[in-house]
Image (tube, grey):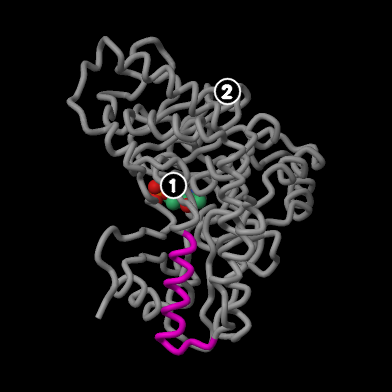
Amino acid sequence: MSVRAGREFLAIPGPTTVPDEVLRAMHRPAVDIYSGPLLALTDGLLRDVARVFKTSGRAYIYISNGHGAWEAALTNVLSRGDKILVLESGRFALGWGENARRMGVEVEILKGDMRRAVRPAEVEARLKADKGGTIKAVLVAQIDTASGVVNDVAAIGEAMRAAGHDALLMVDAVASLGCMPFEMDAWRVDVAMSGSQKGLMAPPGLGFVAANDRAREIHKKADLRTPYWDWTDREGDIHYQKYAGTPPEHLLFGLRQALDMLFEEGLENVFRRHRLLAEAVRRAIGIWGEGQAISFNIIEPQERCDTVTAVLMNGGRDPEALRAYCNEKCGVILGHGIGELSGKAFRVAHMGHVNAPMILGTLSVIEMALNALDVPHGRGGAQAAIDWLGEQVKA
Ligand SMILES: *Cc1c(COP(=O)(O)O)cnc(C)c1O
């Protein structure tokens, strides 16, 4: 027996649910790439992508996923033999750093672990010790999607200034942009990157990079630049060159619609919706955890992010059985554990086009699975989420 008929719900941390309005915006014929409305569409999108990053710097749109945007960010500002510092707090900054290493960059990792955020004081101490200024850039993920941690990018920027160090601050905002505050200029982030398929509610396939003047100055001497990613090539007036070739028209139509929806809701409201729904998830997990069989991966409550929650299954219990139940019986697809958490955790995404029924439904299905699989858990997790949301969202 199953109760999975109808629309399945994708609760993985990307790609996320694409709104029907975005799907519809893409269902149209191709248009001219040399003249007509597409040119104004590009200008508007470049402006609005920068607006979402909160920067007066420049934005670039690539036909790529997040991995491509990683490469775009690195190749435009680094040179062979440069040294960078990667701040560990899960999997993703390490992955970005590994890409840099394979391009001939020397990579040092500021040790962290899967269960906590980057400590800004450790960044400050390491940079203070770098007397000769050999470190050219610091890489960090605002939210690490594997661990479910949120890093305090503003505090890391402060730590770099306190150390009197002028390395570039480069931030991966793939799992956070459009879901929580990101203040590129105010936090003095030099280069930031993201992708279309998470908080930005568009299909996978677009990568975004934003750069401030300092980064664009350093770019002039970067020797890792390649034709496709190169910022300078994309900055001219010729529309075709802004994408280094044919623009990804339909993805751009979809992105336009998705950004319009975000601006219409209001970014502050979007962030608040994410905070409320994330806390609903945490309330439920907090109750279930009383049974000792499951627990939060991120130990400190204030370091748990508002877009994805990684849940450990203790005592050798198999998270795949729980994921299979949710998927096969109920049509809810949860994320699996990745990296060190592979086979030990499941992840619940709460990012992008999500609302109360999606999240409360997901929590209820997880609770069904905990019951059906005899996983010891505190009773009433979904109820705790309902109670808390009801208190926050007044009549
Ligand atoms: C998803 C993700 C990436 C990689 O994005 P892809 O589009 O899968 O290449 C990078 N960083 C973070 C933090 C992510 O969540």
Question: Residue 287's x, y, as percent?
Answer: 61, 76
Q: CA distance from mark 2 to mark 1?
A: 27 Å
Q: Which mark is residue 224?
A: none
Residue pointed to by mark 1: 353
Between 116 and 98, which is closer to the camera in this rendering? Answer: 116
Give above or below for 101 relative to 43: below
User: In the rendered view, does 393 fall on the left or right side of 324?
Assistant: right
Mark 2 C-beta closer than 8 Å to ligand 1: no
Residue pointed to by mark 2: 57
> Which quadrant of the figure contains the N terminus?
bottom left
**SS label for mark 2:** loop
| Total number of numbered discs in the rendering | 2
Question: Residue 200's x, y, as percent?
Answer: 45, 40
| Residue 367 among those drawn in magenta | yes
| Residue 164 among those drawn in magenta | no
User: In the rendered view, does 283 fall on the left or right side of 29?
Assistant: right
Magenta-colored span? 359-376
Between 139 and 83, which is closer to the camera in this rendering? Answer: 139
State if disc 1 and disc 2 touch (CB < 8 Å). no
The residue shown at (45%, 34%) is 261
Give above or below for 244 relative to 347: above
Mark 2: which amino acid? Gly
Between 264 and 286, which is closer to the camera in this rendering? Answer: 264
Q: Earlier in the sequence, mark 2 or mark 1?
A: 2
